[in-house]
Image: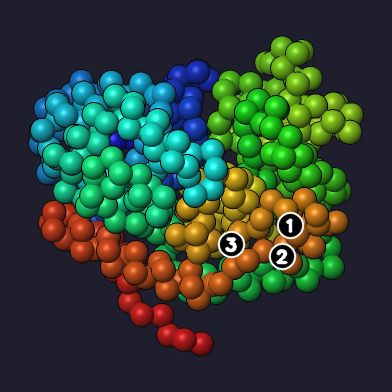
């Protein structure tokens, strides 16, 4: 399997930049690498910077298949030379899980597909998958359309494997009940915000305004209700801002991030909060465990919300591009529109506007589990018992 087991092994052995490199510059990768690992009931050799080296060809040749928990790898402008060489050179059957195509708009654009078709790295990857892949699952209908347009026909819309982490077959119904309790609480709910990368939204007014509103809901309460600010990407300074090492940033970086997140707060108060509530995870298990202690999780980052859902906590996605849009739609996730979030006068007013059907989520997850079971059975790779349990019909209450 390409990637980590869902954690950085011996994290103290790596400096901040090495950690980011091992995470593919985004800690969200941990969540679906962990999910893919927990799907399988068989020994796994993990290939990556902190695991079995890419150069250990013998270790790979002793395995049955190469499983690739993919991300938004169908995007223009990325250099996939090394990855493509590796996938092609291993001479193993490939299973691709969660492949996504990137577009700045929900639903994608024809221009984005044209850019992908003109990108040599993307087209070479498509050729490799068409030749070697025994199974390709994609995030949603937009990525399915992109794959068809680029010549990869046999793909299955299954969202992200991270939906399979929690073993409760009635997970959706439980989240719906917890969401209702959060709306009705007499005290402000304790939340986690799945934060946008600050420098990526600095010049994007709608996303920046949303982030500032979420941060005000997060840090505006007293010490008993304030929650967690979870950062996944954005480079070294964003990582330091969230993991308690803000003092390692230079003065300009600190001032910029503080102004992006909370222009009306005293910077000292921003960093005092971040020292208490900031998080940048190197373990999916720890991430999931921390999400059990909040009432809801909310924000624009898909895998941050999937960490909450893995814990049984409502993870509310605010879709802003093709990736989050198609995943939220495919998996029937709790969702809140940008307009509804921005027009809400309070956090609980926003939560009352969340669209979510717990039964639809549970039904979709059962069907997805059946698809995973069928695909892995063809490769004679056993799946974990909880995946089989999820595929069983859920009694109607």
Residue 82 placement: quadrant: top left
Total of numbered circles in the picture?
Answer: 3
Q: Element at badge 2?
A: loop
Checking the image for residue 353, the label placed there is 2
Q: Element at badge 1?
A: helix
- Work out whether residue 253 or residue 169 is closer to the camera in this orientation and state it: 253
- Kindly report the distance in space between the C-alpha atoms of the residues bearing marks 1 and 3: 13 Å
Residue at the (32%, 32%) spot, across then down: 117
Residue at the (24%, 55%) spot, across then down: 41
Q: Quadrant of the N terminus?
A: top left
Q: Residues within 10 Å of mark 1 (few under 14, many from 20)?
A: some
Checking the image for residue 334, the label placed there is 3
Instruction: Tell me if 100 is positioned left or right of 277 in this view.
Output: left
Q: Earlier in the sequence, mark 1 or mark 3?
A: 3
Pointer 2 with pointer 1, Cβ within 8 A: yes
Q: Which residue is mark 1?
A: 340
- Work out whether residue 390 or residue 11 is closer to the camera in this orientation and state it: 390
């Amino acid at each position: 399997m390409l990637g980590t087991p869902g954690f950085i092994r011996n994290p103290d052995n790596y400096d901040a930049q090495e950690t980011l490199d091992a995470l593919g510059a985004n800690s969200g990768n941990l969540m679906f690498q962990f999910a893919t690992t927990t799907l399988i009931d068989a020994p796994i050799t993990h290939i990556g910077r902190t695991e079995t080296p890419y150069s250990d060809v013998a270790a790979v040749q002793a395995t049955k298949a190469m499983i690739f928990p993919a991300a938004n790898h169908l995007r223009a402008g990325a250099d996939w030379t090394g990855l493509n060489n590796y996938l092609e050179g291993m001479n193993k059957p490939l299973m691709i899980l969660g492949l996504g195509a990137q577009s700045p708009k929900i639903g994608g654009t024809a221009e984005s597909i044209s850019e992908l078709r003109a990108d040599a790295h993307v087209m070479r990857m498509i050729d490799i998958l068409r030749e070697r892949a025994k199974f390709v699952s994609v995030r949603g209908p937009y990525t399915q359309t992109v794959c068809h347009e680029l010549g990869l026909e046999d793909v299955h819309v299954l969202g992200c494997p991270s939906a399979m982490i929690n073993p409760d077959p009635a997970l959706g119904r439980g989240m719906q009940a917890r969401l209702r309790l959060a709306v009705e609480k007499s005290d402000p709910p304790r939340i986690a915000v799945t934060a946008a990368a600050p420098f990526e939204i600095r010049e994007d007014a709608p996303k920046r305004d949303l982030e500032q509103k979420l941060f005000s809901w997060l840090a505006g309460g007293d010490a008993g209700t304030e929650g967690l600010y979870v950062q996944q990407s954005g480079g070294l300074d964003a990582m330091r801002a969230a993991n308690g090492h803000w003092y390692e940033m230079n003065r300009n970086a600190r001032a910029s991030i503080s102004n992006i997140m909370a222009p009306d707060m005293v910077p000292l108060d921003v960093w005092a909060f971040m020292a208490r509530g900031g998080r940048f995870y190197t373990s999916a298990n720890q991430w999931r465990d921390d999400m059990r202690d909040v009432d809801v999780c909310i924000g624009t980052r898909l895998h941050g919300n999937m960490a909450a859902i893995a814990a049984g906590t409502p993870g509310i996605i605010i879709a802003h591009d093709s990736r989050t849009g198609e995943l939220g739609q495919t998996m029937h996730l709790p969702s809140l529109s940008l307009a509804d979030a921005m027009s809400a006068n309070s956090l609980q007013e926003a939560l009352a506007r969340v669209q979510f059907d717990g039964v639809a989520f549970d039904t979709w997850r059962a069907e997805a589990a059946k698809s995973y079971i069928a695909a892995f059975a063809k490769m004679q790779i056993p799946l974990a018992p909880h995946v089989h349990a999820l595929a069983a019909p859920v009694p109607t209450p």
